[in-house]
Image: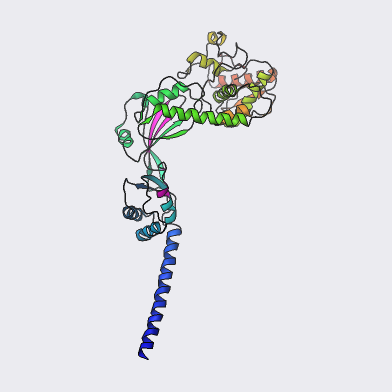
Amino acid sequence: MIWRNIASNFLTLSIVLLLALAGAIAWGKHQFSGPGPSNIAQCVQIAPGASLNAVSQQLAAQGAVSSAYIFRAGADYLDKSRDLKFGSYLIEPNASMKDIVDVITAGGPSTCGTQVILRVGVRANSVLLRDMNPDTGAFEEIARFDPASGDVPEVIAAAQQKPDARLRITVAEGVTSWQIAEALKQVDFLSGEIKGVPAEGSLAPDTYEVEKGSERAALLAEMAKRQSAILAKAWEERPFGLPYKTPEEALIMASIVEKETGVAEERAQVASVFVNRLEQGMRLQTDPTVIYGVTGGRGVLDRGLRRSELNATTPYNTYRIDGLPPTPIANPGREAIQAALNPADTDYIFFVADGSGGHAFARTLEEHNANVARWREIESQRGQAVDTPVQDGG
C-alpha cells in the first residue's frame, strides 16, 4: 500500500513538473518571439570573433533584450549561435529576440554606428561624419569638412579607421564625370588611380557602399554599370515615336532636363518642350548646354553667360546648332532619364523661370513673351540685373 502511495505521489509530482516545464518553455518561446523591451532603435555592434554569450550580455545591458539566457537559448534552438556576423546593426524599436538573432546573423553592410559619407554635389563636396545617438536611435552629425582642403579633422580621420565604420559615397544628380572623378581623388579611404575622366553621363547618381581601400576605378565601373542598366531598361520600355535614334541621344536629353530644372514634378514637362522642338525642327536654345561648352564640365560657371558666348558657334551652343549637342552635359539621375523617355504630352515649346523655383510654360511666342515680362519684373523687384537675355528654352 505504501509503495502504491509513493508511486502515485511520484506520478503526480512528475505531471506537475512536466506541466511546469511545458509552461516555462511556452513562456520562454513567447519572450523570445514577442515584442522586445526597447522603445527606441538601437545600434548593436558585433566585434570580430565575439561569442554569443558576450553579445547576449551586451544586448541585455543595452536593454534590447529582457533575458540574456533566453536569447542564447533561442539562438541555439535556431542553430544560429555560431553565425554571428561582424558589423554594426540597427535594431528596430520593440524588436523581438528572434528578429535580433536574424539581423546579427544575416550579415551584409553595417546599418548603423559610425558613418563617413562623401557627398559629391554640383557646387561643392563634403565629407560628413555621423553617428547614432543611443538615447534617441537617430543619426546625428558629428563633423563635416571640405575634402578639397586636404585638412582632415582628427575626429573624422579616427572614425575612418574604425573596423565597423560604414563608408559611403553619395553622388547628386547633375554632377559631371569630371566632378565625380575629382571628388573620389580627395578622400583617403579609397585607393588607386583614375586613368581618364569617364564619358559624360555614363555614371549613375546614387549612394554607394564601399570598404576602406576600395579601388576608385572599380567604384567608377560600378557607377557606369548602374547607369547602363537604368538607361537600358528605360530605353526598352520607351513609348513609340520619340525623336531619338539611340539610347545615347536619350541620355543627352536626360542630362539637359536634369540641368534645366530642380523641380521633380517639372521634368516630364521640360522634356516635352525639348521633344516638341526637335520634332518641329526648332533649335533647343538652352543655356546649360552653352555653359557646358564653356566649362567643359570642370566646375560651375558662377556668372551669367556673356553675349559673345551665346553668339559663338560651338558643338554645345544649342542657339547655333540644330538638334542635340554631341554628348550629355552631366550625369542625369534615374528620374531625368525616365522623363526624357516618357515626356509629358503637351504642345509647349517655351519655358522661363517663374520666380518660385519652377518655370512658366508656353505654347506660343506671345504667351512666352508675357511670361518673360513677368520674370523680368520679378528680377527687377529683387534688385537683380535684367539685361541678361532670357532664352526660349530656359
Q: State which region is magenta.
A: 103-130
The x, y position of residue 121, in whole percent, is 45, 27
> 187 above or below 131?
above
> Along the line of sight, which residue is nearer the eye, 12 or 167?
12
Question: Is 120 contained in the magenta span?
Answer: yes
Residue drawn 39% across the image and 40% down it: 140
The x, y position of residue 340, in whole percent, is 61, 26
User: Horizontal placement of 74 versus 388: left or right?
Assistant: left
The x, y position of residue 391, in whole percent, is 60, 16
Q: How is the image coloured?
A: rainbow
> Along the line of sight, which residue is nearer the eye, 1 or 39?
1
Residue drawn 60% across the image and 30% down it: 234
- Image quarter where the C terminus lies is top right
> Along the line of sight, which residue is nearer the eye, 227 or 137?
227
> 213 above or below 318?
below
Q: Quadrant of residue 157?
A: top left
Mark count: 0
Q: Quadrant of residue 336?
A: top right
Q: Is residue 97 visible?
A: yes
Question: Is 241 contained in the magenta span?
Answer: no
- Image quarter where the N terminus lies is bottom left
Q: Is residue 263 visible?
A: no
> Along the line of sight, which residue is nearer the eye, 331 or 289?
331
The x, y position of residue 359, in whole percent, is 60, 25
